[in-house]
Amino acid sequence: MTRTRRCLGLGLALLPTILLAGACGNGAAQGPQPPQAVTIGPESVARVERGELRTGPLISGELRPEREATVRAEVGGSILDVLVEEGQPVRQGALLVRIEARALDDARLSAQSAVRSAEQALGVAEREAARTETLVKGGALAERELEAARNAVAAAQAQLADARARLALAERQLADTVIRAPITGIVSNRPVNRGDVVSAGAELVTIIDPSSMRLDASVPSAALRSLEVGAPVEFRVRGYGDQVFTGRIERISPSADPITRQVPIYVSVPNTAGRLIAGLFAEGRVTSETRTGLIAPAAAVETDGSASWVIRVRNGKAERIAVEVGLTDEARGQVELIAGVEEGDLLLTGAAQAVTPGTPVSVAGEPVAARPH
């Protein structure tokens, strides 16, 4: 009896120890598991590279010809011939359009006849004045007769001058019926056809010089301090893919748009190859500052308040690294990393940045090589 009680007491005394040991054993079996390895697609990683970074205000606008000539009718009439087509190259002085000139030709003939009549009248008046002067000197006529003869000469001279002016006008109007190209270029618009009746001032042909284009763009007024005449501009044109064109600011408008508060700028664009076409929409940037350094996609950098950080893959694991950001190239979507990373570092971008630091990471198709700390 006494022995039984002694064994029962010993068992009760050891029970908490056994329970504690069992609890510890279960806790060790259910402890935190090591993070599972993840595989990242190549589209979600980027390398830190050394390159050139450019910053400046973004611009948008329309391409226009630097030199353009709209040829208009100087006289009204019926179109006899149109000798050019849209898209046709022409040289300065080339014949473009001819307007009917029968009425103007009649006016010229009439003016020529008036000139001949005035010339004859002037000759008669001059001879009469010479004869009168001789008679006055001989005492046969009074002095007033000579004065009247000289007045007749002056009147005849005035009539001749008027007739010649009317003849010059008729000839000029007749010449205006033959329309020639004022510049060398390409016909961009030709709104008239043979047989059309036009009035003075009507548009006949528009010619542009494609060798030099102009980008009429605008920038926010807040970016004025970054603008100056001669500053380089990079832009892309809709329809030309990723091809980059360059130009320089030629003029800056002294006033902003009253509605948008955008400031117009005019960019001169060399177009010696003739590839650019007027009327296309363009977007780009004024280059205000250029710097060479370590760059990475902006999508690889996260900012929390004043602190910036990246998720770097090194030795096959993800790690969070604080970085210092410099210039931001908004047009290319790149940022300068001044401190925290090295050239060649592999960074996670986009949704891949949600990977927990310490997680083993591999890149599909590109195994991550171990790099020493």
Image: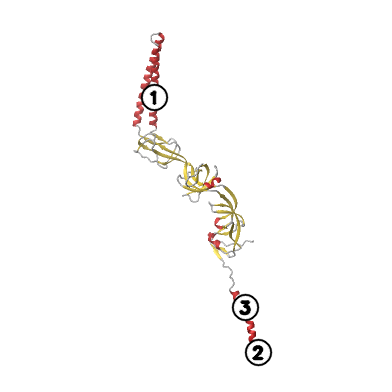
136 relative to 108, above or below: above
Residue drawn 65% across and 90% down?
2
The residues bearing labels 3 and 2 have C-alpha atoms spaced at a distance of 27 Å
- Amino acid type indicated by mark 2: Arg
136 relative to 48, above or below: above
102 relative to 23, above or below: above
Which disc, if any, is residue 20?
3
Picture quadrant of residue 36:
bottom right
Q: Residue furthest bottom?
A: 1
Quadrant where the N terminus sits is: bottom right
Residue 167, horizontal then vertical, whole percent: 38, 26
The residues bearing labels 3 and 1 have C-alpha atoms spaced at a distance of 131 Å
Residue 309, horizontal then vertical, whole percent: 59, 58
70 with respect to 59 (left or right): left
Q: Residue furthest top?
A: 139
The residues bearing labels 1 and 2 have C-alpha atoms spaced at a distance of 157 Å
User: What secondary structure is marked by label 3?
Assistant: helix
Badge 3: residue crowd in 10 Å (few <14, some 14–19, many ≥20): few
Residue 339, horizontal then vertical, whole percent: 62, 55
**1 vs 2, front mark:** 2
Mark 1–mark 2 CB contact (< 8 Å) = no
Per the image, the residue denoted by label 2 is 3
Residue 2 appears in view: yes
Quadrant where the C terminus sits is: bottom right
Which disc, if any, is residue 162?
1
